Image (cartoon, rainbow, N blue to C red):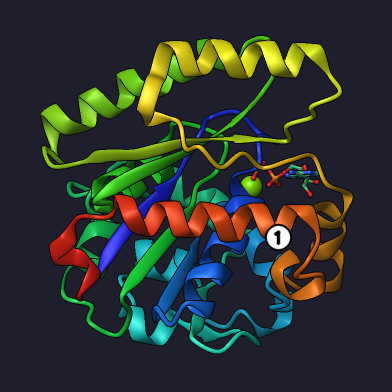
């Protein structure tokens, strides 16, 4: 299984929207896909239509109680896509894990011997705390949604510093599969300018596929559906399908067959 953390310590940049829709696109392509909701807000779980009442075991149990992964997985309505949902308990996990010796390795240990899925996406919370560190510790690679706004690059350098520390301390093989520009609005000249700047600084690290600002993407979660199911032909869905195709091309060969 290849594990991809979707992280950016800024809130509202499109992490959860990207996690839900890229996971759906991969499942539709025939990859057995797991989506782990690691944000106490549980937006990915809600957006996948998993009611709060139905979240019997969650990412909290996985991390804090070391409940086996198989027992924390809920099936979604999408064939081939399973979810480890999040509950509000997870907001306490950072504190509960502080005194634990393997506090940054809990998620990695939980995923290490897992064979039930081909690919796993982790939707991270908007911080660089213990939850995100667990995701970076467990991941083979990182995908960074970046909103095209003025301070986008500043936040990114902080994230890249954290990635370097994680590589030095506990996950030397952590890669960065790419940066995806989100909420792109071609009518807004600032967005265009920021996108150009980001491409100039990061070069090929930036995915060619750009996610447009698209109202269907923001409506879909309230129906408990990925945009790809809610309206598969809207501009946002098409962009995520293109992104999934590009992502597959960037995954290491040996993993693709897994
Ligand atoms: P994060 O997980 O980084 O906090 P979200 O994916 O939850 O970000 O997105 C924040 C808000 O913006 C949500 O209300 C979401 O529906 C909306 N949104 C995300 N991406 C888009 C987009 N491309 N077009 C329009 N709205 C979007
Ligand atoms: Mg989110």
Q: Is residue 197 above or below residue 59?
A: above
Q: Is residue 221 visible?
A: yes
| Ligand 1 under 8 Å from disc 1 Cβ | no
The quarter of the rendering in which ligand 1 is drawn is: top right
Tag 1, which secondary structure?
helix
Q: Categorize mark 1 by other alpha carbons within 10 Å: few (<14), some (14-19), many (20+).
A: many
Residue at image x 85%, y 72%?
223
* Left or right relative to 39: residue 70: left
Q: Is residue 112 placed above or below 100 in the rendered structure?
A: below
Quadrant housing the N terminus? bottom left
Q: Is residue 31 above or below residue 169?
A: below
Residue 161: % across, % down: 31, 18
Any part of residue 38 in sight:
no
Q: Residue 87 location in percent, x, y?
A: 61, 64
Q: How many marks?
A: 1
As rendered, which of 251 and 39 lies closer to the eye?
A: 251
Q: Which residue is painted at 43% across and 34% down in the image? A: 129
Percent across and percent down for residue 13 are 66, 34
Say which residue appears at 40% left-offset and 38% top-offset. Answer: 178
| Apparent side of residue 51 relative to residue 55 in the rendered image (left or right) | right
Q: Quadrant of residue 188?
A: top right
| Residue position marked by numbered label 1 in the rendering | 237
Residue 147 placed where, x, y %? 65, 28
Q: From the viewer's side, name the closer residue of 66 and 43.
A: 43
- At 57% across and 71% down in the image, what residue appears? 24
Picture quadrant of residue 229: bottom right
Q: Is residue 212 left or right of residue 83?
A: right
Q: Quadrant of the C terminus?
A: bottom left
């Amino acid at each position: 299984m290849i594990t991809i953390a979707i992280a950016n310590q800024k809130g509202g940049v499109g992490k959860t929207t990207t996690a839900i829709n890229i996971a759906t696109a991969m499942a539709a392509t025939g990859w057995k896909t797991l989506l782990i909701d690691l944000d106490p807000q549980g937006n990915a779980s809600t957006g996948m239509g998993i009611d709060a009442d139905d979240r019997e075991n969650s990412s909290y149990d996985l991390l804090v109680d070391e409940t086996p992964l198989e027992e924390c997985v809920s099936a979604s309505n999408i064939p081939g896509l399973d979810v480890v949902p999040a509950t509000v308990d997870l907001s306490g996990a950072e504190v509960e894990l502080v005194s634990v010796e393997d506090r940054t390795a809990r998620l990695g240990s939980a995923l290490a011997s897992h064979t039930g899925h081909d690919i796993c996406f982790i939707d991270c919370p908007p911080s660089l705390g213990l939850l995100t560190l667990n995701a970076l510790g467990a991941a083979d690679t990182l995908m960074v949604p970046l909103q095209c706004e003025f301070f986008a690059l500043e936040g990114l350098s902080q994230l890249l510093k954290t990635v370097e520390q994680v590589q030095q301390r506990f996950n030397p093989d952590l890669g960065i599969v790419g940066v995806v520009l989100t909420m792109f609005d071609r009518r807004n000249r600032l967005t265009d300018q920021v996108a150009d700047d980001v491409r100039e600084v990061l070069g090929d690290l930036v995915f060619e596929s750009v996610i447009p600002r698209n109202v269907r993407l923001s409506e879909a979660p309230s129906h408990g559906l990925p945009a790809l199911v809610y309206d598969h032909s809207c501009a946002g869905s098409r962009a995520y399908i293109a992104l999934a195709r590009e992502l597959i091309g960037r995954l290491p060969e040996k993993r693709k067959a897994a």
